[in-house]
């Protein structure tokens, strides 16, 4: 049986992680902008769409927090 190295590091592609981080940040910004525009539309408040945008933003923020941090 082979001896295992105690200092194993996660094997992940840092550039792929950076791309995903950038994509999530762009999507969050886009949804926040769309949410703000929806709230400014005073004649008809669409509570369903407001909630949908909030959930989309929250889900992407959660994914962003779970991405590995590398230095």
Image: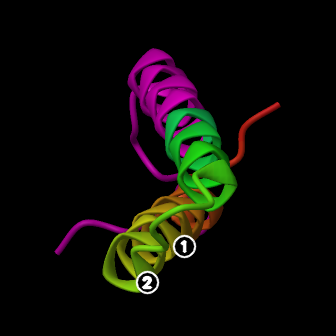
Using a 10 Å C-alpha cutoff, classify the residue at mark 1 as few (fewer than 14 neighbours), some (14 to 19) or many (20 or more).
Answer: few
Frontmost residue, 7 versus 50: 50
In the rendered image, residue 61, in percent from the top left (x then y), is placed at 59, 63
Q: Which residue is mark 1?
A: 58
Q: Residue at x 16, y 75 (%)?
A: 1
Specify the quadrant of the image occupied by residue 70.
top right
Q: Is residue 49 above or below residue 16?
A: below
33 and 19: which one is in front? 33
Residue situated furthest front in the rendering: 43
Q: Earlier in the sequence, mark 2 or mark 1?
A: 2
Instruction: Specify how the rendered protein is coloured.
Output: rainbow
Quarter in which the C terminus is drawn = top right
In front of the other: 39 or 30:
39
Q: Is residue 3 above or below residue 23?
A: below
Which residue does the numbered mark 2 point to in the structure image?
Answer: 47
Q: Residue furthest right?
A: 71
Q: Is residue 45 magenta?
A: no
42 relative to 34 in the view: left or right: right
Q: Position of residue 32 (x, y in %)?
A: 62, 48
| Residue at 54%, 27% in the rendered image | 26
Q: Which residues are magenta?
A: 1-28
What residue sits 24% from the left and 66% below the top?
2
**Numbered circle sitting on residue 7:** none
Picture coordinates of residue 69 (x, y %)?
70, 47
Query: Label 2, label 1: how many angstroms apart (C-alpha)?
Result: 16 Å
Picture coordinates of residue 44, whole percent (x, y): 45, 67
Q: Residues within 10 Å of mark 2 (few under 14, many from 20)?
A: few
């Amino acid at each position: 049986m082979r001896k295992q190295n105690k200092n194993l590091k996660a094997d992940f592609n840092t550039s792929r992680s950076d791309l995903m981080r950038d994509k999530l940040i762009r999507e969050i910004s886009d949804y926040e902008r769309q949410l703000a525009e929806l709230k400014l539309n005073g004649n008809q408040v669409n509570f369903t769409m407001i909630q949908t945008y909030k959930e989309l933003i929250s889900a992407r923020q959660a994914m962003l927090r779970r991405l590995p941090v590398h230095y």
